Image: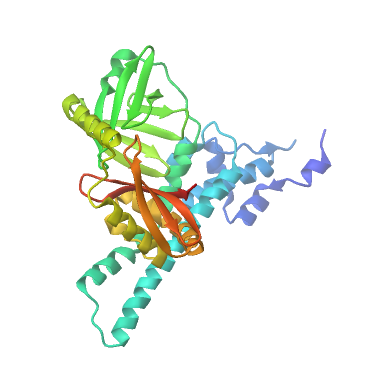
Amino acid sequence: MSDKRNRDHLLTAAECAERLGLTVRALRVYEDRGLIAPRRTEKNWRLYGGAEIARLTEILALKRLGLSLTRITILLAGTTPDLGQTLRIQQSALVDLRDRVEHSLSLVGAALKKISSGQAVSISELITLAKETRMTDLSPDTVAWRRYEQARPRTEVRFEPEKHGSVVGDFQFETGDVLSITRRDGGLLAQLTGQSAIEIYPEADDLFFYRVVQAQLSFTRNDRGDVEGVVLHQGGYEQTAKRIDERRARAVADDLEKRVKDKIPFPNSEALLRRVIAEHQRGEPDYDAMLPALAAAAREQAPIVKAELDRLGTLRSVAFKGVLQEGSDVYDVRFEKGTLECGLTLAPDGKLSGIYFRPGL
């Protein structure tokens, strides 16, 4: 029995391929991979409806992000099409690309203006231009597909104490934060410096995931098979930590505890915050003074931060409040038309590893 009303909304293989800019052969490949399952007529002709078009849109978006068909197959296996998520990823990637291109164009324009007026472009400016105008640096593809991969559903495997227990230990990130992995009955806990311990669940031998946030941990081993590091996958970024001994981990915890208790800010913390605010007000954040993960996130947020600072007007005062449990120096910052609570953290090398702005009371 046929349903003409539904047939009116279905496309043949040739029609589907033509409208999406594909080939019929590509459709067959995706079908063979189990990515799509077109309906069949009584004569065994393939028909493509809304679900198939949505899945093909996902495939094309991920291919544009640079993923191989093998990787796409792994990502989409067992999932239903999520067009909204795909479009949000594309939107984020395009906005990020637009912002970075505009920033690079402003740098090039400033350099050209200097040259036309007979001024020399400094070595520092040339280095900044070299970094900011590389097209590889402008591509948001890696971050976008990582966000997609990190957001996909995870499947828990059975916890095996002897196998999975080998990842227990302490690991320090470039930010200086320590991630401690400990045993609990039937599983593992992960605790980042100054934060609560959270359960993690095995996905494979050295792969674990959180349920409360879209984040995963992948542990790395040396040639002897010993766990020597961990990678945190979250927000489209990857942060690597190296294994450290318990004594060093304890020293980090003790130092943070003292800073929080005695309200000890980082050296020159206030001056640094004032500088960061001034840079954002000018629309010229110093990304080189930030760790890579923070710099990438700051680029995305820079237009929003500048708009808010423009609204608030002239800076009036900066007052230190204390140190949060996770290590951020916190300030009340008063402007002509309102207040913000601002926090910042520094990595051991002195670079900014975290910063936030939120409405004050």
Q: Position of residue 105 (x, y in %)?
A: 40, 71
Q: Is residue 153 left or right of residue 115?
A: right
Where does the N terminus fall, quadrant-wise?
top right
Q: Is residue 8 left or right of residue 360?
A: right
Which residue is pictured at 43% across the width and 28% down the height? 210
Q: Position of residue 186 (x, y in %)?
A: 39, 13
Which residue is pictured at 62% across the width and 45% down the height? 54
Whether residue 338 is visible, yes or no, is yes
Q: Is residue 351 left or right of residue 98?
A: left
Q: Residue furthest top?
A: 185
Is 80 placed above or below 96 here? Answer: above
Q: How many marks?
A: 0
Is 203 placed above or below 75 here? Answer: above
Whether residue 26 is visible, yes or no, is no
**Along the line of sight, which residue is nearer the eye, 8 or 194?**
194
Which residue is pictured at 70% across the width and 37% down the height? 40
Is 284 placed above or below 152 here? Answer: below
- Residue 248, picture quadrant: top left
Question: What kind of colouring is applied to the model shown?
Answer: rainbow
**Along the line of sight, which residue is nearer the eye, 179 or 271?**
271
Q: Position of residue 18 (x, y in %)?
A: 63, 56
Is 181 placed above or below 132 here? Answer: above
Q: Position of residue 335 (x, y in %)?
A: 45, 59
**Along the line of sight, which residue is nearer the eye, 187 or 295?**
295
**Along the line of sight, which residue is nearer the eye, 264 or 182?**
264
Which residue is pictured at 30% across the width and 87% down the height? 117
